[in-house]
Every structure is written in C-alpha cells, then in structure tokens.
Image: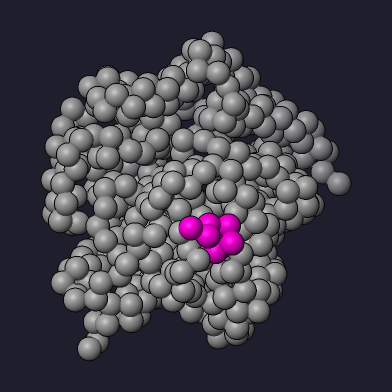
C-alpha cells in the first residue's frame, strides 16, 4: 500500500469531480440550456476551470507525485494514473492560472459567437474571437514546448501522442498521392449511383424512433446512457455508467442514421472502459484517433456494409415506407456508399472524407507555424477545396464556418479523424482473419465484434497508446496502406474501375 498515492488520490478525486461538472455544463449548453444563459454560464466555467487548475497544480500534488513515482509498490493502474497526472502537471505548471481561466471562458463564449456567425453566414463576426483563440493556443504551446519542439507538434500530441508533423506529413502525402486520383477515377466513371430517395420530409419523431432502434441494435445501453439532439453531434461521458451522445435530424435520412451509428461507436468505447479504470485519469480512450477509429469503424466498416443491413433492412423500410418501400437493399447500400465531392465534412462519404481532414491539417499548420492570417482563412479554405475536391464553397457557412472545433480551441484535433479511419481499416483486415466478419453481421451477431473490440481496445483505457494497441492486435505498427487498400477495393467495386 502506497501512503503517497493514497494521499494523492484525494486530489485526483477532486479533479475528476470538477471535470465532471465542466462536462455537465458542456452537455447542458449544447442540448438544453436557454440561449440567454451563455455569458453568465461562461463565468461559472471560468471559476470551475480555476478550481480544477488549483486542484491539480499545487505544491502538495507535486510532492506526492514525486513520492509516488519513486514508489515501486504501485500497481500498474496506479502507476499509469501518476504518469497521466505528471503529464497534466507539466502542461499546467507553465501556464499562469489567470490565463488558463480566461481561455476557458473565451472558448465557452467563442462557441456561441461561432454559432451566431455561422447562422448569419458572416465570418467577420467570428474572426476577432477566433484570432484570440489562436493567439492563446500559440502562447500556451510556446510555454509548453520543449527545446526544439514546434508549437503545432505540442498541440498534436494532446490528441494523438507520437504522431508529430513529420509522421503526419507522410500520412497525408499518401492520402494526396492515392485518394485524389482515385476520386478523379470515380468522378469520371460512367456508373451512376441513385440516392434521391434519401432526401425528403422525414419527421423528427420518425428519425428518433429509428435512431434509438439502431443505437440499441449496435449496442448502446440506455440504462447507462442517454441520447439528445444538438447542432453538432458528439459523445461525452462522466464514467462508464453515464455516457451521453447527441444526434441531429434533417432532410437527409442517411445523415441522421449514420450520425447515430457513429456516436454509438464512441459510446461503446466509453461503456467498455474497465470498472477499475473509470473515473480515473486513465479511464478514457487511448487517444482521439483510436476513439475515432471506433466511431468510424461502426459507422462505415460496419454500418455501410451490406451484411449489416440484411437482418434489419425491413425494419428501416417499415419506418420510412414512403421513401424506401420500393427500394431494394442493394440500391440502398449503393446509395449510402455513393462518392461525390461535397462541402460539408460531417456529410462526406468515406472516399472524400480524409481530403476534408487534409485541408484542415494544412490550414492549421499554416496558422500555427506559417504566415496564414485568420482573415485569409475563407479564401485559402476555398482554394484548397477547389484544388483537392474540385469544388469551391460559395459561402462561409458551407466553408470555413462549418466546424465547431476551432471555437473550442481544438487545434491538432482534426488529424485524429483521418487517423481513426486508417486505424479502423487496419483493424478490419486483421479481424477478418480472426472471425467471419461479414457472416456475423448477416446473422445480427454484433456482440461478437463488440466483445472483440472491448477485450482488445476498450477495456484498457489509456493504459496503452494507439500504436501499442495496433501492434498488440495486428502484430505491426500503424500502416496506412490498409486504408488505401480498403478504399480502392470498396470504390473500385462500386464504380467498376477495373472494367
């Protein structure tokens, strides 16, 4: 028994409680809080953030962390918590408390400014606030950077440890080299994929009913989780017995269907965190990339697979008889896999999705490391969409203002989406060697797949990083070639590119 860790745990428990309170405000703000609550709530968030800062970053915690790190009697889970706390201390100790609190308040307010600017289709309304967010993040990264470390690498490490710009540049160069010409071949294909029946007047009630059905079918446990509606779907958790996800409803049926499946993938990761880890610093996903691998695995590799729909397609037709009663399964599956350049990342097909991320990665690098100004973002954004996707946004609502992330200060987050897709493809090819993957889907036996992922990924929380998880499961390090192979096989077949 470690006396130092026992004393340290009191501070850890307080920090976790304060984080839970902040997460509840985030959830409430996105789902139920009245519009006028925002500015006053931002001040509450500022105060709670200061309390969290103080709970973690004080001399007694530093003393106890040092003593715990020297204690060889710690269990692996205790040692991992001390490691995570040491990293958090290193991050916070170089940032002045008042600046930390002011940034928390700024991002809370920035999210509302972004929402208003997006609704008004007015980037200039958001630009001054975004400029403040960027300057804060650059300043914080400067405080934290080790000798020779670049600021954007500091930010990237917060979301995907070990994936710095040098490695990501190689990854995205592969995307440019392989996916851009593949998209060109698909666009020039004579194969026409019909998807008009996916657009129509679908009531919120209809979409909610089928959403709850799909969530439960995939594995969401409503005894431990809730589902709500927000402008930007997301998943959060307080612990593995309280997982919360949101979705959105619109005139595009596939958007709401796959939003639910995507967020359920995130939720399953949180449900699967081991009971011995939950409500600790290691009781969360290994990285944002690994988290996205699970959501995109369920959304795309499972959810857009014909075998997934074989047991439940009639249920979907019964839920939307006017749209789908005359639409066969093959036609439906082809429609939800159609590849076509579009402006909105969250609505993008699998083939074009990583090009949306590539654009954001390049913009973030130029904002943080280069000479790109906030004021020039709309123009450069549009130029890159024209270069990589062959389309140019006509307004900022469908361009630079479409994502919430920058208002939250989440620079370095976007690459995780593309990495998650690549992680998922690597896992998929390995799992097909371990089990009859498509056969399990056809039989509706998703619990076998879920349990495999829980046993090999979810239960470990942050005890392992993403590259260790991939090596332990597949026997090799991260390899983006599987992702390229997956896209070429899928879209080559759908668009008959080998004929």
Which residue is nearer to you in this view: 443 or 346?
A: 443
Taking the spot 60% from the left edge, 79% from the top edge, the residue there is 442
Q: Does residue 391 lie above or below 177 as drawn? A: above
Taking the spot 62% from the left edge, 74% from the top edge, the residue there is 311
Percent across and percent down for residue 140 are 39, 29
Q: Is residue 468 visible?
A: no
Q: Does residue 57 lie above or below 419 as drawn? A: above
Would you say 483 lies left or right of 59 here? left
Q: Which residue lies most toward the right here? A: 1
Q: Which residue lies most toward the bottom here? A: 499
Q: Does residue 30 lie above or below 304 as drawn? A: above
Percent across and percent down for residue 438 are 56, 81
In the image, is residue 346 part of the stretch drawn in magenta? no
Quarter of image, res 401: top left
Asked which colour scheme the image uses, the reply is one colour
User: Which quadrant: the C terminus?
Assistant: bottom left
> What secondary structure characterizes most of the magenta part?
helix
Percent across and percent down for residue 369 are 24, 39
Q: Is residue 385 visible?
A: yes
Look at the image and give the residue range highlighted in magenta.
316-322
Would you say 419 lies left or right of 227 here? left
Which residue is nearer to you in this view: 132 or 402?
A: 402
Taking the spot 16% from the left edge, 32% from the top edge, the residue there is 376
- Total numbered labels: 0
Percent across and percent down for residue 46 are 54, 17
Taking the spot 86% from the left edge, 46% from the top edge, the residue there is 1
């Amino acid at each position: 028994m470690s006396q130092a860790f026992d004393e340290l745990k009191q501070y850890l428990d307080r920090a976790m409680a304060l984080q839970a309170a902040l997460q509840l405000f985030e959830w409430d703000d996105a789902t139920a809080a009245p519009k006028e609550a925002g500015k006053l709530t931002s001040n509450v968030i500022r105060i709670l953030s200061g309390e969290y800062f103080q709970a973690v970053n004080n001399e007694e915690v530093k003393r106890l962390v040092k003593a715990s790190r020297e204690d060889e009697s710690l269990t692996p889970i205790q040692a991992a918590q001390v490691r995570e706390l040491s990293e958090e201390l290193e991050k916070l100790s170089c940032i002045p408390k008042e600046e930390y609190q002011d940034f928390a308040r700024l991002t809370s307010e920035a999210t509302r400014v972004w929402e208003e600017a997006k609704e008004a289709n007015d980037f200039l309304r958001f630009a001054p606030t975004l400029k403040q967010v960027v300057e804060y993040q650059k300043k914080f990264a400067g405080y934290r950077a080790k000798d020779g470390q670049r600021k954007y690498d500091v930010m990237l490490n917060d979301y995907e440890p070990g994936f710095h710009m040098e490695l990501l540049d190689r990854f995205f160069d592969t995307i440019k080299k392989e996916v851009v010409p593949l998209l060109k071949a698909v666009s020039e294909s004579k194969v026409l994929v019909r998807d008009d029946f996916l657009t129509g007047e679908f009531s919120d009630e209809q979409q909610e009913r089928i959403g709850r059905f799909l969530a439960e079918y995939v594995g969401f446990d409503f005894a431990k989780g809730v589902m709500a509606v927000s402008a930007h779907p997301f998943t959060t958790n307080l612990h593995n017995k309280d997982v919360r996800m949101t979705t959105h409803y619109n005139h595009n049926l596939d958007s709401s269907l796959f939003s639910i499946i995507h967020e359920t993938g995130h939720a399953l990761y949180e449900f699967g965190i081991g009971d011995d880890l939950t409500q600790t610093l290691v009781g969360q996903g290994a990285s944002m990339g690994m988290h996205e691998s699970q959501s995109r695995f369920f959304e795309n590799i499972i959810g857009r697979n014909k075998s997934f729909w074989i047991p439940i397609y009639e249920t979907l037709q019964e839920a939307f008889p006017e749209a789908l009663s005359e639409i066969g399964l093959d036609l439906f599956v082809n429609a939800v896999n159609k590849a076509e350049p579009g402006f909105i990342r969250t609505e993008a097909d699998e083939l074009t999705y990583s090009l949306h991320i590539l654009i954001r990665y390049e913009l973030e690098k130029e904002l943080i490391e280069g000479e790109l100004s906030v004021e020039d973002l709309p123009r450069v954004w549009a130029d890159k969409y024209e270069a990589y996707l062959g389309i140019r946004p006509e307004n900022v609502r469908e361009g630079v203002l479409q994502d919430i992330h920058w208002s939250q200060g989440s620079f370095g987050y976007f690459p995780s989406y593309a990495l998650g897709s690549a992680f998922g493809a690597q896992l998929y090819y390995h799992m097909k060697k371990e089990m009859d993957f498509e056969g399990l889907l056809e039989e509706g036996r998703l619990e076998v797949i879920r349990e495999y992922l829980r046993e090999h990924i979810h239960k470990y929380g942050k005890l392992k990083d993403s590259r260790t998880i991939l090596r332990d499961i597949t026997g090799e390090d991260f390899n983006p070639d599987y992702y390229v192979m997956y896209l070429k096989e899928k879209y080559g077949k759908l668009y008959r590119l080998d004929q």
